[in-house]
Amino acid sequence: MNKEELLGLLVCPVCQGKLELLPDAGTCEGLACAKCALVYPVREGIPVMLPEEALTRDAWMNRDKTGTGE
């Protein structure tokens, strides 16, 4: 199974929305929910699908600027 096929099996644990991969030039990719706009980190290739680890899309995009990055 490739990355796209695996991504098709995952849904947001909060709202069951579809997820899309957000590539990141920094330290961490993210999985963004199209429905509720939460972003879940991908650490060392493993999605962290815990609601308490999720950030809003705005917080995800600004995390390096605020010092809250991975």
Image: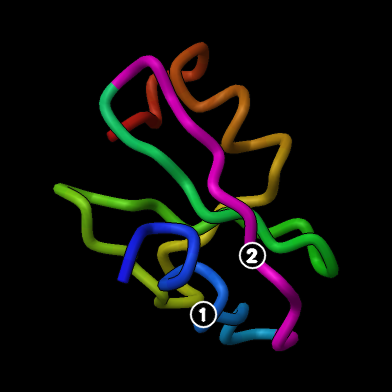
Position of the C terminus by quadrant: top left
Q: Are marks 2 and 1 in contact (CB under 8 Å)?
A: yes
Q: How many marks?
A: 2
Residue 19, located in which quarter of the rendered image? bottom right
Q: Residue at x 70, y 43 (%)?
A: 57
Residue at image mark 1: 10
Q: Secondary structure at mark 1?
A: loop
Q: Is residue 25 left or right of residue 7?
A: left
Q: Nearer the viewer, residue 27 or 7?
A: 7
Tell me, yes or no, whether the highlighted magenta stretch contains residue 25.
yes
- First reached walking from the N terminus: tag 2 or tag 1: 1
Q: Give x and y (percent) for residue 49.
A: 41, 74
Q: Could you tell me the amino acid type at mark 2? A: Leu
Amino acid carrying mark 1 in the image = Leu
**Which quarter shows the N terminus?**
bottom left
In the image as oriented, which residue stretches furthest toward the left? 44
| Figure check: 38 above or below 8 | above
Real-space Cα distance between discs 2 and 1? 7 Å
How is the model colour-coded? rainbow
Span highlighted in magenta in the image: 15-26
* Residue marked by disc 2: 19
Q: Is residue 24 magenta?
A: yes
- Left or right: where 25 falls relative to 58: left
